[in-house]
Image (cartoon, grey):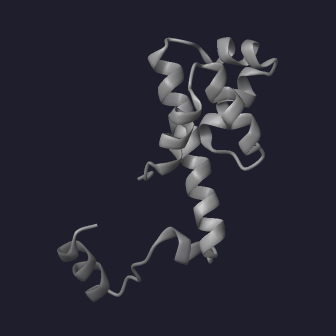
Amino acid sequence: MDATKKKRLQSAGWAVGSADEFLGLSAEEAALLEMRLALSASLRERRTKTRLTQAGLAKRLGSSQSRVAKMEAGDPSVSLDLLIRALLAVGATRHDVARALTKRVA
């Protein structure tokens, strides 16, 4: 958010902060959440780039389409292990996974 908008909101009585502050997340929890979201975004991007459907990816993983949708949405019920396994199933390398983890998610 730009400084002008932030000032305008604060002068109107709004509290401005980060999602981490709003949710009361510790630094570790915030980092884990950001990693999960980065992996999820990378999975969706790579899957769509390869023109693979969620159902097609689910078949490769021995899972369901709804589970793949949860992976791509960053659902907390999906393990990081499954996210990484799904990335590898769509052709990502260890280097690609590491690169995804270093991306900042908006």
Residue at image position (82%, 17%) is 62
Location of residue 75 in the rendering, given as x and y in whole percent from the top left corner: 69, 45
Residue 55, by quadrant, is top right
* Residue at the front extreme of this rendering: 95
Residue at image position (49%, 14%) is 50
State the residue in front, 33 or 99: 99
In the displayed structure, would residue 22 be above or below residue 68?
below
State the residue in front, 50 or 1: 50
Location of residue 47 in the rendering, given as x and y in whole percent from the top left corner: 54, 21
Seen in the image, is 45 located left or right of residue 85?
left
Residue at image position (29%, 85%) is 12
Location of residue 24 in the rendering, given as x and y in whole percent from the top left corner: 62, 77
Location of residue 92 in the rendering, given as x and y in whole percent from the top left corner: 56, 25
Instruction: Specify the quadrant that holds the N terminus.
Output: bottom left
State the residue in front, 10 or 55: 55
Q: How many marks?
A: 0
Residue at image position (66%, 11%) is 56
In the displayed structure, would residue 7 be above or below residue 70?
below
* Residue at the left extreme of this rendering: 4
In the displayed structure, would residue 51 be above or below residue 79?
above
